[in-house]
Image: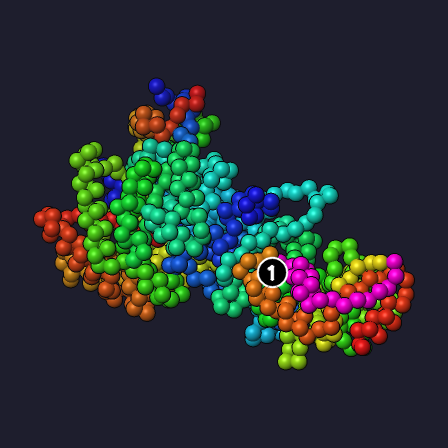
Amino acid sequence: MSFGERFLIHPDLFPARLSGESWGDARLNLEIAGTSHAIEGLTDGQAASMAERFAGFDSGVPAKDAVRSRVFRMAPEEFRAIDTRGWNYDLDQDAGETWVRIAGMRFVARLAWRPDLEGALWTAASDVDFPGVLENYLRVLAAYGLAAAGGALLHSAGIVDDGEASLFVGVSGAGKSTFSRLSLDEGRQVLSDDLNALRPTTAGFEALAVPFAGDIRSEARTGARPLRAIVRLRQGPEHRLAELRPAAAVALLASCAPYVNRDPFRAERLMTNLASIVAGAELRELAFALRPGVWSLMGREVRA
Amino acid sequence: MTTFSAVMARTWRENQLFSVLVELTYRCNLDCVFCYNDLGLRGTPLSKAQYLKLLDDLQAMQVMNLILSGGEPLAHPDFFAIGAAARERGFVVRIKSNGHALSGVLARRLRDEVDPYIVEISLHGARPETHDRQTRVPGSFERLLENLRGLRALGQRVKLNSTLTGWNEGEARAMFAIADDLGIPLQFDPEVTPRDDGDRSPLSLTASREGIRDLFRLEFERGDAAEAAAGPRPVEVARQADDAVPVSTSKHCGAGSSSIAIDPFGNVYPCVQWRVASGNLHEASIQEIWSGSAALAKVRQQTEEVKGKLAGFGKDAGLMNFCPGLAASRSGGDPLAVYDGATQRAAILGEVQAERKVIPLRVLETSSR
Amino acid sequence: MIGVDTVLRRAKDVRHRLLPPEAVVIRQTVPEVLVLNDVAGELLERVDARTPVSGLLDQVAPLYDVDRATLEADALRFLTELAEAGIVEVVA
């Protein structure tokens, strides 16, 4: 099945450039993982609902160097009706040297480097579906923006301990959410139990929450924390901590870097970023059991 | 008996709006290197209700030709609603499309719901490398040929347009062969135009002098062959009013007199190539703009001045295919400023005619955009 | 044979506009263009697949300073020509 066919009645109408009919004149200014984003072309209702949903990430005023995204109308009849029962929602993705395109439920999107990153979202969703659509788009945008900035967006549980953040990475079902709740119970803060951002600083990498990730919301959602460790996570009969080899860590992170890891035009850049991340972090493998005490082990070992 | 040409001339003379080009959207599924759309233009897009009101008004004004353009007009979220409404209101609808998506259901819906008089589609080369280099969408050439065959099979009248560029000037003969094979007319425009925001970078694709000369030779050669084979060509009807009108008028063209263009944000211009701000449909109705716009009044006067100025070029005037809009965009605002492309065209056409040893009565028909 | 009781409709491919003192008619499928005089144009404008020719004449008569018999004769001649050209079709 070729690009877009799963979602679009006429995949050949897929926009090849960033233009169309805006929904309205309202805009939203967001701070996502250290980058300013200006989302233009919204209705007042769309902008207000997103500002409420992304409270704490709304930067209020547009930054001069903001990544600009425009939101355009698309006819509902351009999209296929999809029976989502028992269906695993995965976006269609395609890339070229200077562009990326995405197709999903009730939206398509395009990112372009001209040379700075810009984006556009075309959607048939005006109201209740819109927040989900915009979040899907922003995930892709943030992933590419971070990769271009030398960092990465990673499927992970981001836990703050003593002012530093560690990312616990694992395949789906490894226990990221469970581990996050255990960590909260043990007095740690959670950036996100699903997606976290890493971006380079002059003193290594820092971890940041993103506004559209995970069910656990804590006061740690804003601000940046120095990265302490990358930890491969799995559940086990008891808490046990082991070393993780750098090569295995890079491979692990690559498998958990959504969108960009499927992009042949940006794979090399991503791998370079991940190698830098791994080089400056403590690397561990953690098996955890469903009982307290994991952070006494983690805290001691990781800080050692 | 009154001829159609005489009626057309009257529309120019009496400022009877006859043809309206509507750029429905700048959304496009191709990304042509030399596209003239101003993608930086901002504004509130016209709503479906505003388009329907516009169609009502244009029908009441007895406008006959409605050209739906873009971008890719079929990519507008309300294209079929607008197109079907145009059909119901009795317009002769022309669609300017890139043809990339015109297959299957979409092509059938276009025929059944909009019933356009003609679909005009751009061909940028005779080879995938050339066409796709222009569209920047791999596979667009092969897709287009497939879609053209499909449109013909559906019984849809199609015409191919091509701008001669430095990239495709060596392929004109092969492009005509493709068109002939498909049974579709192909019309070349030898002039690349600046973008509507004034960006002149597309001009770097302008065809060479030799390329333009070869095209003219080829067109004469084909014209001769067609006449020899079939006698006089059939009369093509319902042409856009700003095409050549043989009946004498005091105006150079119908821009602002019998035709206008409207962009996706409701801005009204005398012509798609002469983008003088003449009003906005968010602020006034098309009737109000048509009868009250000082900018349109000035343009109407300027088309007379252009005619007067070109008269000074004698026989070359008819060979220049002079476009006041292009003159204005190239000179920074003066629609009377004769530009190189026009004089060069007249010179080249004159040379080719001299080769043929004919009296230069015939002006090759070109229709930009 | 078109008479005052005939009901007509415009052919599906006909597009027309009134540009007094003429009307322009385009048949999309042929394609061809015709220029009609204003009487023929006004009649064509009113053809609706329901109204008999006599009703069309009632509507058009106030527009012209001409006696009914002359108008009727002209109208029947014009409508017959339009039918022969495929621009209008007899419904009943």
In the rendered image, residue B279, in percent from the top left (x then y), is placed at 43, 61
Residue interval drawn in magenta: A237-260
Question: Viewed as shown, does residue B365 lie left or right of B68?
Answer: left
Give me the chain letter of mark 1: A
Q: Quadrant of residue A119?
A: bottom right
Residue plotted at (15% across, 55% down): B350
Residue plotted at (71% across, 73% down): A281
Q: What residue occupies the far left of the structure in this picture? A: B357
Q: Is there any visible trace of residue A223 in the rendered image?
A: no
Q: Is residue C64 above or below residue B251?
A: above
Q: What residue occupies the far bottom of the structure in this picture? A: A202
Residue plotted at (63% across, 63% down): A143
Task: Check disc 1: other Cα within 10 Å, few if <14, some if 14-19, many if 20+.
Answer: many
In the rendered image, residue B150, in percent from the top left (x then y), is placed at 42, 36
In the rendered structure, does residue A116 fall within the stretch colored magenta?
no
Decide which of B80, A15 is in the foreground and name it: A15
Decide which of B131, C71 is in the foreground and name it: B131
Question: Viewed as shown, does residue A184 lie left or right of A231?
Answer: right
Residue plotted at (90% across, 65% down): A292
In the rendered image, residue B96, in percent from the top left (x then y), is placed at 40, 47
Amino acid at pointer 1: Val
Residue position for label 1: A260
Dot 1 falls on a residue whose secondary structure is: helix
